[in-house]
Amino acid sequence: MIPSIYTHPLGKYGHSAGTTIGMWDAQGGVPFRGDYPLHENTTYAIELNVTVNIPQWKKNIRIMLEEGGFFGDNYFEYINKRQTAIKPIKVN
């Protein structure tokens, strides 16, 4: 099992300009774009994933989760509360 965490700034339509902290394929940091400080009153996508091997499928799969977060005056909070359970999707 290989976990990772990373983030990117959020704007009105998804990705936005700003500090990038890690990437799924750059867990050691993001030179230049990741060197800027976080600015107060900005929003970020907090992205988590884990790669697991499924022997029956004979391959690795990545399971992802993305949460919106707000960085304020020396505090952070999740925008829509933190997801704490799996939300299954019914397929007909």
Image: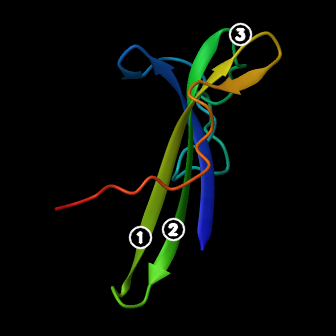
Q: Which residue lies furthest to the right in this view?
A: 74
* Residue 85 locus on image (x, y percent): 57, 53
Q: Is residue 92 placed above or below 46 in the rendered structure?
A: below
What amino acid is found at the position of numbered circle 1 in the picture? Ile
- CA gap between label 2 and label 3 equals 32 Å
- Circles 2, 1 touching at the beta carbon (< 8 Å): yes
**Which quarter of the figure has residue 20?**
top right
* Residue 59 locus on image (x, y percent): 38, 81
Q: How crowded is mark 2: few (under 14 residues within 10 Å), some or many (20 or more)?
A: some
> On residue 40, which mark appears?
3
Of labels 1 and 3, earlier in sequence is 3
> On residue 79, which mark appears?
none
Q: Is residue 82 placed above or below 36 in the rendered structure?
A: below
What amino acid is found at the position of numbered circle 2 in the picture? Thr
Residue 26 lies left or right of residue 56; in this view the side is: right
> On residue 51, which mark appears?
2
Q: Quadrant of the C terminus?
A: bottom left
Badge 1 is on which residue? 61
- CA gap between label 2 and label 1 equals 6 Å
